[in-house]
Every structure is written in C-alpha cells, then in structure tokens.
Image (spheres, helix red, strand yellow):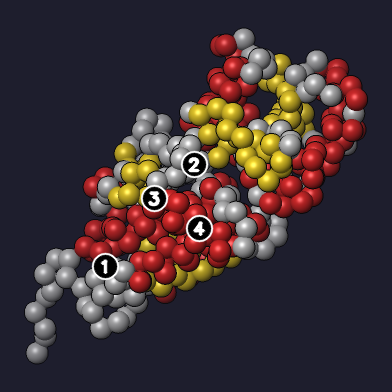
C-alpha cells in the first residue's frame, strides 16, 4: 500500500542528506587561493546550517568538484552532479567557467546560485534556474571608472589578454569613460614583454595602467617592471578584477603590490553576523578571509533558506528566487531582475574600491564606495 503524499514543504527527518553541488577552482590554471577561500566559506556555512538543525532535520552535504578554471570540466561536473541528485549548485569564481556551468544548469533544470562570477551575460537567454550574488561586471566596473575619474585619471591604458571577460571589462570602462572625457587604450600583453608595456605607457602619456590579465602571470611581471621604471613613478596601477585581494599577491610582490586599487564586495562595517563569520573564517583559512569567502558563506545561507520549504524539489526551489529575503554576512539578500541581466541578481552587494596600504601592506584602505 502506498503511503499518502507528504504535505507541501514537509520533509523526511530520517537523516538522509540534502546535497548541494559545489563548483570551485582548486588546481591550476584556476585561481587556487580564490577557490580555497570560496570553499572555506561554503563549508563553514554548511557546518553552521547543520549545527542549527539542517534542512528540516536533514543534514546538508556539500559535494565538491574542482573546475580548474576549465569551462568544459565545469560543464561535465554539472552533468555528474545532476545525476547524483544534488538539489542545487553553488559556487564558481571564474566568469567564463561559471557561464559554462550556468548553461548546463539551465538546460538540465538545476538551480544554480553563482557565488563570485560577474560577467553580465552569465546565460545567453533569460533563465529562472540561475541566480547570482556577486554584482554584474557592468555595475562594479562603472564604479571603478568613477573612482578613476574622481582621482584625476582620464588617460587610461589597459594591459589585457584575449578573453571574453577582459574584453567585456574593457568595453564597460570605455563606454563609461568616453562620455566623461576619458580615453581607454588597449595593449595586448600576449604580444608584448613587460618592458615593452612600460615603453608603450610612456609613449601614450598614460596616467593609469589597469591590469586586465591573469594572476600570478603576467600580472606580477608587469607590476615589477612598472615599479622599477623611473619614467613611470607617478603612474597609477590598478586591478579592478581584484588580484591584490589575496595574500599570494603580497607574498609575490611585497611593497610593489601596495597602492594598486581593486574592487571588493564588502560593506564598510560588518554586521554582527558578518563579524562572527569573519572570526570563524580566519580560523578556518589561517589567514584573513577575502570577500570571496563571504560570498561562499552567503551562498549556502541563501540556498538553505530556499531548500527548507522545498527539500530536493528543484523546480519549486527555482521558482522561489524572487521570494528570498535572508540576512547574509554583507547585508540583506533579495533577488530581482535588473535590466540587461539574464539571471536573478542580488542588486546590489556593497562595492568598494580599496588598495593595500604602502605603510602596512596587510592593511586595506577604502578609497571609494559605490
């Protein structure tokens, strides 16, 4: 005899886990340090959810897959995780990788909350299966462009590499700066040595150089060359994508890595929840947590809130993005559909332009708030 159907929202309490798939870059050429911080935040939040009783009595379990910054590997991981029966997907740091994962999640009908990737066009067409915590690139990078103008920089050179992400960033900067009297010149560093980049900066009369390139290389070599070139003593070096956020940057560059403004997604002052999580993340990571670790924590906080009424019902979970209202580490999180964004979006997380203090490179200075 068949058991009667459970009421909507009712869940078993027999201990079977509710599983979330986690996509994280943990090996090269992925940005491993970013991946470790993202995973640290995801895992801490899972622990906290389970300490508070889990998902209506069922433990929450993270099923982790390394994307290694490879879109094909990420897409294959989404297929595997879907077959394993995960209730939702979380994570990913690299925008191009997240886009591949989002496409597969959309095709398979698997809810995906992207933690960190910012590329505006996360999916080709509007979808209800995907949402994002990080701000869209157009939002954050326009704030960065405003910072440049406010600091007196209108002749901008971008050192860039062939990539959808870097091309998108360059376009955003140019479109925002041009009507305000700014110019943006591109240098393809795949064809230039760091010394040649310095010569081009002098030739172009640039007042700011933006690093739209990979980390650690060629970013570290370019910074080292610019800092050693007496002709460029007054030039601003910037990294809107956030390379200086992580400790590896300071380790590799020392004092040369200071005073390089970048974007990060934290409030000026953490809430009591944020402060508690910061302490726990610092202990877990054995270093100061980056904003990426907070993104990981908030991702699980949101998904746990959504899964509690619906359990492993993927369709009902995806239908509830617009009804989410949860307190995260960096503010109250709700999702909407901003114009031009194809996924459900937290609009917006706090945005800062910060740099490492030359007098104390382990300390960050807030230069501009968007």
Q: Are marks 2 and 4 in contact (CB under 8 Å)?
A: no
Which is nearer the N-term, disc 2 or disc 3? 2
Q: Are marks 3 and 1 in contact (CB under 8 Å)?
A: no
* Secondary-structure class at tag 2: loop
Residue found farthest to the front: 359
Q: Which mark is residue 311?
A: 1
Q: Are marks 4 and 1 in contact (CB under 8 Å)?
A: no
- Identify whether 360 is placed above or below 75: above
Q: Nearer the viewer, mark 1 or mark 2?
A: 2
Using the numbered discs, state the Cα–Cα distance from disc 3 to disc 4 in whole angstroms. Answer: 11 Å
User: Along the line of sight, which residue is nearer the eye, 162 or 209?
Assistant: 209
The x and y percentages for residue 99 are 51, 48
Q: Nearer the viewer, mark 4 or mark 1?
A: 4
Q: Which mark is residue 279?
A: 4
Instruction: Name the residue beneath numbered marker 3.
Output: 272
Using the numbered discs, state the Cα–Cα distance from disc 2 to disc 3 in whole angstroms. Answer: 14 Å
The x and y percentages for residue 256 are 80, 38
* Secondary-structure class at tag 1: loop
Quadrant in the picture for residue 203: top right
Mark 2 Cα-neighbour bin, 10 Å: few <14, some 14–19, many ≥20: many
Q: Which mark is residue 266?
A: 2
User: Along the line of sight, which residue is nearer the eye, 211 or 122?
Assistant: 211
């Amino acid at each position: 005899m068949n058991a009667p159907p459970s009421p909507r929202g009712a869940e078993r309490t027999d201990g079977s886990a509710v599983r979330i798939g986690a996509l994280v870059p943990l090996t090269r050429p992925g940005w491993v340090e970013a991946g470790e911080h993202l995973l640290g935040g995801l895992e801490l939040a899972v622990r906290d959810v389970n300490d508070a009783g889990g998902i209506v009595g069922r433990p929450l379990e993270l099923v982790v897959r390394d994307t290694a910054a490879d879109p094909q590997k990420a897409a294959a991981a989404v297929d595997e995780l879907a077959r394993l029966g995960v209730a939702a997907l979380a994570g990913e740091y690299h925008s191009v990788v997240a886009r591949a994962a989002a496409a597969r999640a959309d095709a398979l009908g698997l809810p995906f909350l992207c933690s960190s990737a910012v590329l505006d066009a996360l999916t080709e067409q509007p979808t209800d299966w995907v949402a994002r915590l990080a701000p869209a690139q157009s939002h954050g990078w326009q704030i960065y462009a405003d910072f440049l103008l406010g600091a007196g920089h209108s002749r901008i050179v971008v050192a860039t590499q062939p990539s959808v992400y870097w091309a998108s960033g360059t376009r955003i900067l140019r479109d925002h700066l041009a009507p305000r009297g700014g110019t943006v010149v591109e240098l393809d560093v795949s064809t230039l040595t760091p010394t040649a980049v310095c010569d081009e900066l002098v030739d172009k009369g640039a007042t700011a150089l933006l690093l739209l390139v990979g980390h650690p290389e060629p970013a570290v070599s370019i910074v080292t060359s610019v800092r050693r070139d007496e002709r460029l003593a007054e030039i601003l070096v910037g990294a809107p994508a956030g390379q200086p956020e992580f400790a590896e940057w300071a380790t590799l560059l020392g004092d040369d890595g200071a005073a390089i403004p970048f974007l990060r997604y934290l409030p000026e002052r953490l809430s009591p929840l944020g402060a508690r999580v910061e302490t726990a993340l610092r202990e877990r990571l054995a270093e100061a947590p980056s904003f990426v670790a907070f993104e990981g924590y908030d991702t699980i906080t949101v998904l746990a809130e959504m899964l509690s009424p619906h359990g492993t019902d993927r369709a009902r979970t995806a239908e509830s993005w617009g009804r989410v209202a949860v307190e995260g580490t960096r503010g109250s999180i709700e999702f909407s559909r901003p114009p031009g964004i194809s996924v459900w979006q937290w609009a917006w997380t706090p945005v800062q332009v910060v740099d490492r203090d030359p007098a104390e490179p382990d300390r960050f200075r807030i230069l501009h708030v968007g």
